[in-house]
Image (spheres, coloured by chain):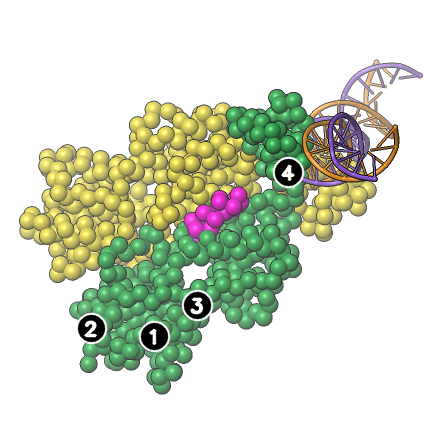
Chain colours: A yellow, B green, C purple, D orange
Amino acid sequence: MNLKQLSELLGLSQTTVSRALNGYTDVSEATRARVRAAAEAHDYRPNTRARALATGRSRVIGHVIPKISSHAMVNPIFADFIAGAGETYSSAGYEMLISVVDLAQEEKAYLSMKRRGLVDGLIVSAPRMNDPRIALLDGIGLPYAVHGRATGTDRQYSWLDVNNRRAFARATDFLMDLGHRRIGLVNGLETMDFAHRRRQGYEEALRARGIVIDPNLMRQDEMTEGYGWRAARDMLAQPDPPTAFLVSSVICMLGVRRAIEEAGLVLGRDVSAVTHDDQLSYLRDDGAVPAFTATRSSVREAGQRLARMVIDRIDNPEAPHVQELLEAELIIGRSTGPAPR
Amino acid sequence: MNLKQLSELLGLSQTTVSRALNGYTDVSEATRARVRAAAEAHDYRPNTRARALATGRSRVIGHVIPKISSHAMVNPIFADFIAGAGETYSSAGYEMLISVVDLAQEEKAYLSMKRRGLVDGLIVSAPRMNDPRIALLDGIGLPYAVHGRATGTDRQYSWLDVNNRRAFARATDFLMDLGHRRIGLVNGLETMDFAHRRRQGYEEALRARGIVIDPNLMRQDEMTEGYGWRAARDMLAQPDPPTAFLVSSVICMLGVRRAIEEAGLVLGRDVSAVTHDDQLSYLRDDGAVPAFTATRSSVREAGQRLARMVIDRIDNPEAPHVQELLEAELIIGRSTGPAPR
DNA sequence: GGCTGTTACAAAAGCGCTTTGGACGGGACC
DNA sequence: GGTCCCGTCCAAAGCGCTTTTGTAACAGCC
């Protein structure tokens, strides 16, 4: 059933049927009701492609996931982020298009999406330090919003980020309040902007209390369980081992906990640890008191809000850019306690 | 730059330019070269929407992720599966559309995708027992392929699945060969077809050796670390505890390992465990000998192949249905050893 | 009665492609 | 010379919508 058939069936012109369904006022309410009923009865849905061609808007928003190499890591927060964004899109009448693209082809991919009229807007994920994509997208003229920030650019753009610096500063402060002085940092890859900021927060907090920063207490890598385990094990084996850890993700934290237990220590008593928790649904902690003390911020909610942000930019491209800085909650769990003396 | 502008610039008709770029033979090679060069020079890309409207094919494939409730679990294999499928799509010139839909609206969503001409085909994920979606999609007339199978339907459809039954039967056999007689099953939700089959494999293998199936040794739930931990802890606390576990995912396995270690036991010596490993990139094990003995099957590869399968169905809807049953490898790691006596 | 305004509909253009159905000129063939 | 075919190219229709631009009918007003 297409518009033509529906209009013939109703004895009306395509114009009137279209305008009736799209809420124009130059259609009598009686006619509108009749049209609506017929559309409902035949389950008429306007053809997306035709509508997109006629309006010049596709009502699709693109997410690009760069493929580093064939076996590269997929970001574990991806699924929850997508779920959040997808919720917003469907309730706003948008569709989500995901494109897996070779990292080297990323610029071309953005341009091609614009040229082909594939999407009305974009979400940019996982910004790196001095990320070149921002300038690129401004040049292309496609509305976008960034999940995170890119240190090193002085351009204005719309973004949503967790206050990673403050979150890690607070967590560091919290550990120091408990008496910890040697705090190991098990960070993500510091080419990623968020990891860079977390280290800043950590270092600032230490410096503010006059604690010398010890490079032996800092690690960075892709955030796997195995990496968390190795990092914590190695640091614990040092001559002057840390009494606490600051960890960048729950997955890593699972490895850190293992290393601590394997060393014959008790997490939360002999060694403390705070992790960042993106509230990934498949890692959720359903205990009354959470297992891990954590700086917590829902990545799903970030997805929801960021989706709203691009939609707003599409609706109003000239509006000033919007920035949203989410503060992570500091949730006390069972993985922290006073420093042993 | 659109087709009209390009053709005017070349002094050719739109027809000729279009046919030159699309490889038709009624264009001289000289002209084709000239057209190609101009298209390249101006980075011309045909407008997707216009092309879709003209051809009746959108070159988009839909993935529907049902939303159970606002806080429902996102499937952790989602990200890697999508990455795999996305790779195939981009090299085949397709786009991937992901739609987050209320579980109750799922049928409507499929129908609407068809009616609106949004997608040329669909991937159906996480089939449940007696899944109604298969019959529904056949009725709609949209090509699709299923990731997994739905026990209880006798319809023909195209699917790709891991041989979960055999994988778990083999793993059970392997544990019994090592002398284990009491083997705990830490399964996923058995409303999911794959979990049901895994239990079948487990039970068959036990029965084949005349071992009585003990309901106290079987658990099922959503596969989180916490669930793995609780399940293993509880079973280990029973009067006649298991000496081995069969676990449905690596995330669960991390919990199982923790429970074992907390019980003062050594994994691979006092208690053995085999897990299924979807080779999720963020849980990868980079050791020389893997930490876990596992039935291994790459969900990313499954995504790649399944994407190919839908594309083939789109290209040739009348072709007989295709089924692909991937055998999981049984990889020996450090989590298994002879049963203690 | 003539003018203006308003209401309710419709014809037709247009979005940017693909595809159908020629058209034209130049051999090849008889 | 006429016919046929082949190689190249093009005009125009069509995909299914939205939107612009009417238009007819009727009411209100002087």
Image-quadrant location for residue A145: top left
Q: Are marks 1 and 3 in contact (CB under 8 Å)?
A: no
The one of A169 and A77 positioned closer to us in this rendering: A77
Label 4 vs label 3, nearer the camera: 4
Q: Which three-letter amino acid code belongs to the residue tagged 4?
A: Tyr
Q: Whole-percent x and y of residue A120?
A: 53, 34
| C-alpha gap between disc 2 and disc 3 | 29 Å
Image depth: mark 1 or mark 4 in front: 4
Which mark lies nearer to you, 2 or 3? Answer: 3
Q: Residue at x 72, y 48 (%)?
A: A1
Distance, label 1 to label 3, CA atoms, is 14 Å
The x and y percentages for residue B219 are 36, 71
Separation of marks 1 and 4 at Cα, in angstroms: 58 Å
Chain letter of the residue carrying label 3: B
Please name the residue that numbered disc 2 is placed on. B270
The residue singled out by tag 4 in the image is: B24
Label 1 vs 4, first from the N-terminus: 4
Foreground disc of the pair 4, 2: 4
Label 2: few (<14), some (14–19) or many (≥20) C-alpha neighbours in 10 Å: some
User: Residue A135 falls in which quadrant of the image?
Assistant: top left
- Residue at 62% x, 59% y: name it: B319
Q: Do the residues bearing badges 4 and 3 touch, measured as CB atoms within 8 Å?
A: no
